[in-house]
Image (cartoon, coloured by chain):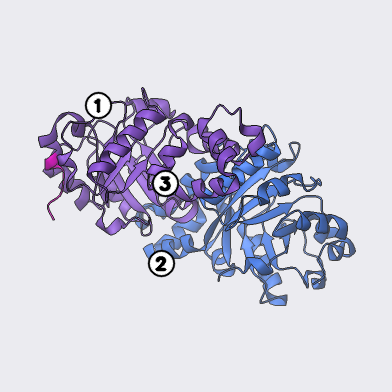
Chain colours: A purple, B blue
Amino acid sequence: MDIEWDNTTHATKIDPAKPLPSDLEPLTGTDLVIVGGSDGVTAENTLETIEAIDASFPDLPIFQEPYRSDHVSTETIDAVDYLSIAAVYNGDREHFVGKHVDLFAEVGQKPDELLGSSVPLIGDLVASKGIDAVANLTEKVIGEGYVIQHLSSAAANRAGVEAAYSPEQVAGAALATESLYGFPIFYVEYSGTYGGPEDVQAAARYLEDTALFYGGGIDSAAKADEILAAGADAIVVGDCFHDDPETFRETIPNR
Amino acid sequence: MDIEWDNTTHATKIDPAKPLPSDLEPLTGTDLVIVGGSDGVTAENTLETIEAIDASFPDLPIFQEPYRSDHVSTETIDAVDYLSIAAVYNGDREHFVGKHVDLFAEVGQKPDELLGSSVPLIGDLVASKGIDAVANLTEKVIGEGYVIQHLSSAAANRAGVEAAYSPEQVAGAALATESLYGFPIFYVEYSGTYGGPEDVQAAARYLEDTALFYGGGIDSAAKADEILAAGADAIVVGDCFHDDPETFRETIPNR
């Protein structure tokens, strides 16, 4: 499916390692769900999460944002609209390009060499469906150009981020996304803290074809409005979805 | 202009730091000229080279492939069809993403902060033409996903390449280009030595929208044919253009 970015202003990031709220009704009004996390995530709990959301909201687009290849299975790929791969501009080489090439090198290998693969995805996928499955997989892949700005976050630590970018560097990474790398999404990630509108303003100036996402610390309508007014196409709200449905509801823009 | 990749099977790489042959007639039959180099290259000798080629072959597409930002000027940008930026998969972080973000960060900065820029391009361009010029520049930028396979070459040394890729890794980088990074060109570079068809075969299997270039050591019709038969869209011929026109002519496929 093609995502209608013009109608995507609110995304919900759901960690499959955390229990889903018993009542999913607060998701009414969000435009996109991104399923992903790190510690405790498996392909199985990812699939369960995707299926539960899809059962209640069959028209809601769902991305899987895997951190490792073993978070992905043929079932999760079939169940989602897109597999979004984060490339971290201010991270280490591994998290911008290294691990992605490793993944695709596994994907690209011949079926008979893959039956013993340590990547469950690959062995199953290629053995059962061959090269067409590789083509299907790669059609579902989209890249997200990330800048991780909260240095003491787990996300920054995992991605080898040693320094936050200045607004000028954020703008440069945005322009590089738009012009050179061509990822459909540029993502300013403040992971767990509120970063304010400055980076979003800096990036928005140079993005035309690229959707601009902001995530981190949005826990009120005022913060949601501030980031959207600064030029973000969509805000991403995560933490409060799991534990504070009233706050979560406040972050959904009125339309 | 849009490049017609279907009709591009032979590209000529010209180093502006070397004197152009007095007779440019051997370029008849090449489909694309790529102007770029490292030692001794300046924006001025780049422009002279581009202008000399364009005067003799006004319909021949010309790329500038700059190694450093001071190889680029408003004049070189205006004179070429595309500014091609090499991202080296098996190089260091700097040569896949770091220096590109730095460049775009300079490009993106505000005109009044750029008058004293160390990058001639940027100060002139943005000061004289403003944000529209930035948009024009970025429309001319295309990425090339490189794999540099000749470890003792100057190119490998400059880009921080510590290991050549196996054919499986080349295939992975090709698939990552096609699916994730979206560069229009994937380039297998053997810089000065002939690498044979194996990497090209490995990459070609997974490239549909991406043009596959091979460069390195092509000095006969047989080698040209072997690489094209292995699935390359285009061979890139460099060294012999400058010093051995008869050999250069042999590398141009008969059509």
Give the structural element (helix, strand or loop) at label 1.
Answer: loop
- Please name which of the two marks, 1 or 2, marks the residue nearer to the observer: 1
**Answer yes or no: do the residues labelled 3 and 1 have beta carbons within 8 Å?**
no
Residue occupying the far right of the picture: B246
Residue tagged by mark 1? Answer: A19
Horizontal side of residue B197 vs B36, given as left or right: right
Residue B45 pos. (x, y %):
67, 61
Residue tagged by mark 3? Answer: A173
Give the structural element (helix, strand or loop) at label 2.
Answer: helix
Measured along the vertical axis of the image, is residue B180 above or below residue A24? below
Residue drawn at 76 percent across, 53 percent down: B230
Give the structural element (helix, strand or loop) at label 3.
Answer: helix
Nearer to the camera, A192 or A36: A36
Residue B105 pos. (x, y %):
42, 48
Answer whether residue A241 is magenta in the image: no
Q: Based on the displayed image, in which of its 4 quarters is residue B28 positioned?
A: bottom right
Horizontal side of residue B244 vs A105, given as left or right: right
Residue drawn at 32 percent across, 38 percent down: A50
Specify the quadrant that holds the N terminus of chain A. Answer: bottom left
Nearer to the camera, B189 or A51: A51
Specify the amino acid type for callout 3.
Ala
Horizontal side of residue A184 vs A23, given as left or right: right
Q: What's the magenta region? A: A249-255
Specify the amino acid type for callout 2.
Lys
Nearer to the camera, B20 or A144: A144
Residue occupying the far front of the picture: A128
Residue A86 seen anywhere in this rendered image of the structure: no
Residue B3 seen anywhere in this rendered image of the structure: yes
Q: Earlier in the sequence, mark 3 or mark 1?
A: 1
